[in-house]
Each structure stands twice: as C-alpha cells, then as structure tokens.
Image (spheres, grey):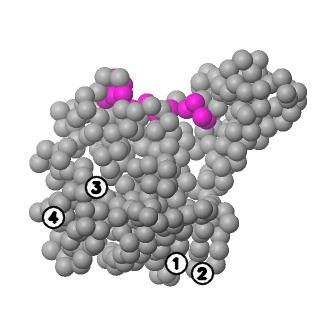
Amino acid sequence: MLQRIVLDHFRNYEHQSLEFGEGVNALIGANGQGKTNILEAIYYLSLLRSFRTTQLSNLLFAGTGQFTVYGEVKNDLGNIVRLGASHGIERRLMLDGRPLHKTSEFISRLICAPFLPEDLAIIKGPPGGRRRFLDIALCQMSQPYLKALQEFNDALHSRNTMLKTPGRYPKAVVTAYDQVLADRAAMLEIMRQELARRLNSAVARQSETFFPDGRKLAVNFVSGIGRLLESPPEDPALVREKYLQALDESYDRDCRQGTTNNGPQRSDLACMLNGRSLANYGSEGECRTAAIALRLALLEILKEEHGEHEVTILVDDVLGELDETRRGAFLAQVIAGGQVVFAGTELPKEFPQDTRVFIVERGQAIPQ
C-alpha cells in the first residue's frame, strides 16, 4: 500500500508531497490541473514507465533536466519500503537508501492496477498493446518472468540486428542466440497461457454484470509458438524443441525480412464478445466496457496473488463510459477492499464517507 509519494519536477509539479490512506483517496479538480499526473507518477514508481508516453523527457517539469519520484510503501509484513527513482541524463534507482542497478529489483515493489481511458487500446488496438497488458501483469506476479522477458528481449534485439545485415554475420553467429530465445520463450508463453486461462474465467463472471443481456466476454491466448503446434503444450522442453525447430526452418525468411518471425513477440490475446472479435467488430462502447471488465478480472487475480490490501487501484476518467447500473457495479468492486486513488472532476456519490479528498489546481494537491 502506498502511504506517501513525493514528486519533484514531474509534469506540472515542481514539488508535491501527498499522504494516502488505505481506503479511497480522491483527487478532485477541473480538467488539465494535474490529477492524472499524480496517477502517472504512482504508475511510474511501480513499473518505471508511463501509461501515456514512451518519451520520459515528456515527464519533466518545464525548464528542468531531471525528475524524481519517491514513495513509501507499506508491505504485507507491516514494514515500510522506501523507493526512489530519478530520470535525467541517466536513471537512478534507490531502495531503502541504497542504489539499485537492476530494474528487476525495483519493479513491482508497489503493485498497482490501473483503470484508464488508454485501456481501450487493449481491446481495439494492435497486438503489441495486449502483449504489454499480459507482460505487465505477469511482471507484477513473478520476478522470474520479468527476468526471462528482459533476457528474451535482449537476445531478440541482438539476433534481429544481425539479421538486418546477414552478409556480415555467419549463420552460426546469428543462431547462437536461438537457445536463449527458446529457453526464455518457453517460460513466457506457458505463463501467458496460464494467465489468459485465469482471465477467461474471471471475465466470464464479469460478463454477467457488464453484459446483462446474456452476451459472453471471453479471451483467448494466441501464442507465437503454440500456433506452430497442434495444441499449445504445458511441457517447457517440448516448447523449446519446437521453437528451435521453427527458428531453424525460418532462418532464410528471417534473413530476407531482417527480423525474427516466430516467437512470443508475435503472440496476441484475442478478446471476443459472443464469439466475435471485439477488435474487428466491436463498437467503441462495447470495447470500452470490455476493457473495464478485463481490468477488473486482472484486479481479481492480482488480489489473489498478493492479498486484497496489497494492490493500489488507480482510476482515471472511465466512469463517463458507463451507464448508472454498470457504474455502480464497477465502483462497488473497486472500493470493496484495498487502496484506491481516484481522479475526477467530482466526488462520486458511491464513495464512502471517510474518503480522503485532495483538491487539485494548477499543479498543487491540497488535502481537505
């Protein structure tokens, strides 16, 4: 649970310190005042990335060259973990006052579950957004997964770099990365497949709330490795063997195209409503509702993994997409347990009386 966060030179905040409670915390103010920027800072403290931009320079306060986000997190043992992340010419990470050199030792010390307008891209956007959704979720659940993902991406980048100029590198040099790719890919795809199975069970339950007319929401994992097999196996050794075979068979095509064609980087999560692809056939309203249901399904799983009170829920500007019944069902689930940080123009009537309120105006958040 996030107890305190400090922003220095982050977005439109020159300096801001906020103390949050374990229940509902509400950032209230007009649009463009900096509410979402606080949610973005919490997300960055959790995952070292923004949910709005890939250019971290965009997070800098105007006229400065470095931002810092500091947080105090109470873990499940009641201990306070102190996290600090600065980004300027280089990134610096701190844990309880000591420097960290590996992002894997920092990421997900704070577990967060966001509900954002950008979530529409999970349903409607290209496959990369859905892979990122799965990867971020699994990185919050498994340190070995995060390590395997980093190692796979490093090996894939090196192999693809050489494939772009194959005449300079013998085949044996290029394929030296294949064993690393195969080993890590087996873990990635099997864990993605298992998460998709759990998500599918959870979104089926959410369908009853968000599609009460009887339509069924479902997700189906399409593996960049599993599609090479008759059925995706759970045996890592078989996955490795088949993937190595596929890499060898596609080597000439990879050289021609300058990229690795098979693997976890080609996987997808098909989101379906009554058996029809939402990405291809869903209306914007259906897709936005499905995105909220999918996020709630993941929240259920994160709470199962970490405990109900160990997940910080971020909610930004998603209520306007819901009718009154769905809005009530959504808020009831969100505030049922754990910590919530909500950003909106007004305080929802469904929030409890003890909600901690901050008024946000011109880059200042003032507790009420």
State the CA–CA distance, disc 4 to disc 2.
37 Å
Inspect the magenta stretch and tell me whether residue 270 lies in it: yes
The amino acid type, in three-letter code, at marker 4 is: Leu
Q: Is residue 326 magenta?
A: no
Whole-number angstrom distance, CA of label 1 to CA of label 2: 7 Å
State which tag comes first along the sequence, 4 or 2.
Answer: 2
Labels 4 and 3: the sequence-earlier one? 3
Q: Residue at x 26, y 40 (%)?
A: 289
Q: Classify mark 1: helix, strand or loop.
A: strand
Q: Helix, strand or loop at disc 3?
A: strand
Of label 3 and label 1, which has the lower sequence position?
1
On the image, numbered disc 2 is attached to which residue? 97
Residue type at mark 1 is: Arg
Q: Earlier in the sequence, mark 1 or mark 4?
A: 1
Kindly indicate the quadrant of the structure image that contains residue 368. Answer: bottom left
Identify the residue at image location x=60%, y=68%. Answer: 92
Helix, strand or loop at label 4? It is loop
Which amino acid type corresponds to the residue marked 3 in the rendered image?
A: Asp
Question: Where residue 27 sits: x, y (%)?
Answer: 24, 67
Give the Cα distance between marks 3 and 1.
25 Å
Structural crowding at the residue carrying mark 1, measured as other residues with C-alpha within 10 Å and reported as few (<14), some (14–19) or many (≥20): some
293 left or right of 133 in image? left
Q: Which residue is mark 4?
A: 347
Secondary structure under tag 2 reads: loop
Image position of 160 (left or right of 285): right
Which residue is denoted by mark 1 in the rendering? 82
The residue labelled by disc 3 is 316
